Image: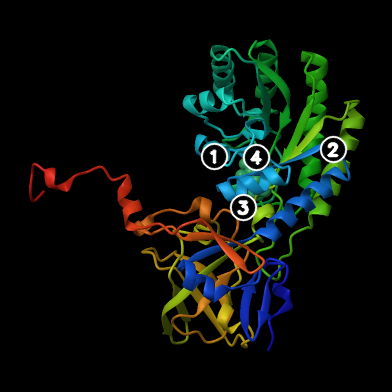
Amino acid sequence: MTFDPAYAPIFPRTTAVRDGRLSIAGCDAQELTREFGSPLYVFDEVELRTTCREYVQAFTSRYADTEITYASKAYLSRFMASVARDEGIGLDIVSGGEFAIAMAAGFPAERCHFHGNNKGEAELRETIGAGIGRIIVDNFYELEAVDRIAAALGRVQAIVLRLSPGVDAHTHAKTTTGTLDTKFGLPISTGAAEQAVADAQRLKHVDLVGLHCHLGSPLFDIEPYDEANAVMLPFAAEMVRKHGMRLREYSPGGGFAAQYVRERPAPPVDVYAEAIVSSFKRRCAEQGLPLPHLFVEPGRSLVARAGVALYTVGASKRVEGLRTWVSVDGGMADNIRPAIYDAQYEAVVVNRADDEPTETVTIAGKYCESGDLLVKDAHLPPTQPGDVIALPASGAYCLTMASNYNMALKPAVVAAKDGRARLVRRRETYADLLATDMWDASQNQERGT
Ligand SMILES: Cc1ncc(COP(=O)(O)O)c(C=O)c1O
């Protein structure tokens, strides 16, 4: 048995198997866990940069005035922000915390777009004060707040209105965002979007530069992008006529799928780019709209494949006639996606990568929830304690959703390139857990309560 080539699109392109051992970017995966601890997240830097370039190329070759704005909620660190900066990609941020990381990496504030349905006053002050490029305004409360804060800072803030076009993107109920019944955006069908355009046009300290929508994620079908454009661009044309709005920028959001398992390939970047750009050009032409600057916001698809999670096997349990459980040293505290979205992953034993997968097992995490599973039906060779299991396509929405549940220590993250791995984030320690716990137990007045 040799390593199944069907894994190739899920692992970074530098992944190799020699003598049954899997390596990423020239680094032996099991050795990495010995050096940096387990669990461990490994990012392949070349894979990351290659994907950024594929995005830029796929869109700008079809429409030069396109900007890729990476949705950093998928994964953010100073390392990631600096890769985005080097690759000429903007950042979509959704909190003061994400903005702070971007700034700490020397990312230009004017290339950041601030999203979210309930931005705080302090967050708005910080970002507007620092010269953020765009605030993607989600509701009336925010429109007023941005105008007021920009006025106090003596600025005019460029804004884009996030609209909900009423399009069902046929994805998981928890990740669909373009329908009427969602917390995100100003609905077009109720008249709220038009009211917001009219209000924004009157306000003195906001400059309404464009419109935005995001349908949800991941979208394996490309049709919803055209369905959204078919609602958004006629609406834009109407706003130009009725309220003198100038559509200088437009975004159909992100939501591009990533491949997680062998049987479910994601559409290539070129397929999304072709569908979005051709529909956008056609719908603008139909409405007589001059083509605006286009920004697209890939999140998961930009980082998922570059990241591989590594876990070490501990206990196993066979329930005869039912299931074999293989427990690893991580789980829902570092990857909650299987627990909340039934997300699926593949698993490969990195130190037995050429061994025949003879067993179907459930890979369980170590945390105190029976829903703490990583892979329900993994096909593995027989495993031993100490074996290391890789979950490919773990670059997106794992680390950024990680928690300290059960006082778990968040794992280390390394960036691997040319046989060398550098620390991006050290593994947490017990001292980190205590760093924000301010209670001095020796001062308790009442004992025994
Ligand atoms: C406004 C916006 N843009 C882009 C994205 C990125 O989606 P994905 O990671 O699926 O590409 C999200 C995800 O939540 C989003 O809310």
Determine the secondary structure under disc 4.
strand
State which tag comes first along the sequence, 1 or 4. 4
- The residue carrying mark 2 is 280
In this rendered view, identify the residue nearer to me: 1 or 197: 1
Q: Which residue is mark 1?
A: 104
Separation (CA) of disc 2 from disc 1: 35 Å
- Give, as a three-letter code, the residue at label 1: Ala
Local crowd at mark 3 within 10 Å, few (<14), some, or many (≥20)? few
Measuring from the top left, give residue 350's x and y in whole percent.
58, 78
Looking at the rendered structure, the secondary structure element under dot 3 is loop
Inter-mark Cα distance, 1 to 3:
34 Å
Q: Does residue 39 lie above or below 126 as drawn? A: below
Quadrant where the N terminus sits is: bottom right
Residue 393, by quadrant, is bottom right
Circle 2 sits in a helix, a strand or a loop, which is it? helix
Check if mark 1's residue and mark 3's residue have beta carbons within 8 Å: no
Q: Residue placed at 53% from the left, 12% from the top?
A: 152
Q: Is residue 290 left or right of residue 151?
A: right
Separation of marks 4 and 2 at Cα, in angstroms: 22 Å
The residue under label 4 is 91
Q: Earlier in the sequence, mark 2 or mark 1?
A: 1
Real-space Cα distance between discs 3 and 2?
A: 25 Å
Q: Compared to 111, does 390 lie above or below?
A: below
Name the N-terminal-most of marks 3 and 2. 3
Q: Earlier in the sequence, mark 4 or mark 2?
A: 4
Residue bearing the label numbered 3: 172
Q: CA distance from mark 4 to mark 3?
A: 25 Å
Which mark sits nearer the N-terminus, 1 or 3?
1
